[in-house]
Image (spheres, grey):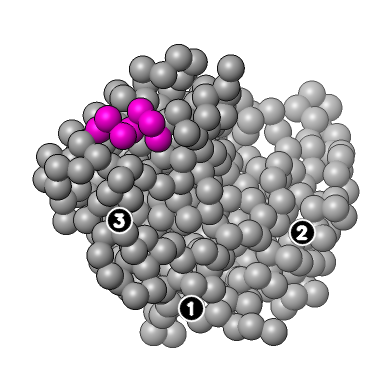
Amino acid sequence: MAITEQQILAALRGVVDPETGRNIVEAGAIAGVAVKDGHIQFALEIDPAKAKQKEPLRKACEQAVEKLPGALSVSAILTAHRAGPQGHGPGAQGHAHGPAAAKAIPGVPGIRAIVAVASGKGGVGKSTTAVNLALGLAAAGQKVGLLDADIYGPSIPRMLGIAGRPTSPDGKTLLPMKNYGIVCMSIGFLVPEDSPTIWRGPMVMGALEQMIKDVAWGELDVLVVDMPPGTGDAQLTMAQRTPLTGAVIVSTPQDIALLDVKKGVNMFRKVDVPVLGIVENMSYYLCPHCGERAEIFGHGGAREMAKTFGAEFLGEIPLHLSIRETSDAGKPIVVSQPSSPHAQAYRKVADRLAEKIAAQLGEGGRKAPRIVLG
């Protein structure tokens, strides 16, 4: 029999917060309960100033729910308590639903530029592109961070060959993980790899904000953000709450993918984020044996789309087995085969992107974007 939300809440009623003497359910501290196929997730709302103090309480919550028959994995996260519209008392837990209700946050100290790598749809190689562009920027001497903003399908830990969990010396701020000379953060470091993330919108938005603000990124020239695919709540949250310097759109050449490029470009323009350029991924296939070039998905569509929107075409990336194999192995092609023509294709795009970022910052940097309706 499937575990129900009522069973989870019943188990959590046995957990008492020693600070208040009340069980956490009656105190209204539990939010976003989600369960699927035995995998359970929920949030424990706390005062962010007491994050370190509440860590034992978080663990107690997980242990209580793990005792339920059929529970395969349990993940409890600490989230900042949000007061309701009137802000009265601990029970006023109104969440802002949707990006229009979100409040913009100031820029992240120490980070000169934040660039979103986005796509209108999944399956176009956006994450592979984001990783190799970040490594290309680092190879050019820049200090680079990489944020995996895809809460539902995090892939950066595997692509960068990083395992383990980030640490927090003070119980408030996470230290980013590191490999190949760049620092990174992903929800994939915080939940089991085989555990589905089944959070509702407010939890996703809260997690994204925490992975930006509550991570000790240090001094960075560029923070590359691997955005989730599409143009939904999470994408708008990132665009509105984060002072993005600009966005890079990734697409494949076929018409169905290019239709979604239009949505991506229009979304960023709606929230006043400059589109720094468009990259055509899987642009062509070059046979390693005979040298014949095949344009499997068509060719040049992204270039034409860039012209249509008055955006720059940053370059084309070939379809090649080595790119896939190195990404799956946690050894991206820019660092594992730096002299290969495929790595050089990424480096060329990264170099032009660096120029675009510098030009954008020369205009006085980015302020938090505003939402334009209509």
Does the magenta-highlighted stretch encompass residue 325? Answer: no
Measured Cα–Cα span from mark 1 to mark 2 = 22 Å
Is residue 178 at least partly visible in the picture?
no
Does the magenta-highlighted stretch encompass residue 10? Answer: yes
Q: Is residue 30 above or below residue 210?
A: above
Numbered range of the magenta stretch? 9-15
Is residue 43 at least partly visible in the picture?
yes
In terms of secondary structure, where does tag 3 sit?
strand
* Residue type of the residue flagged with mark 1: Pro
Q: Is residue 233 above or below residue 145?
A: below
Mark drawn on residue 80: 3
Residue 130 in picture, x, y percent from top left: 54, 48
Pointer 1 local density, CA inside 10 Å: few below 14, some 14–19, many at least 20 = many
Q: Which residue matches tag 2?
A: 260
Q: Residue at x 79, y 24 (%)?
A: 289
Judging depth in this view, the residue of 335 and 57 nearest the camera is 57
Task: Looking at the image, tell me whether mark 3 or mark 2 is earlier in sequence order.
Answer: 3
Measured Cα–Cα span from mark 3 to mark 2 = 34 Å
Q: Is residue 353 above or below residue 372?
A: above
Query: The C terminus lies in which quarter of the figure?
Result: bottom right
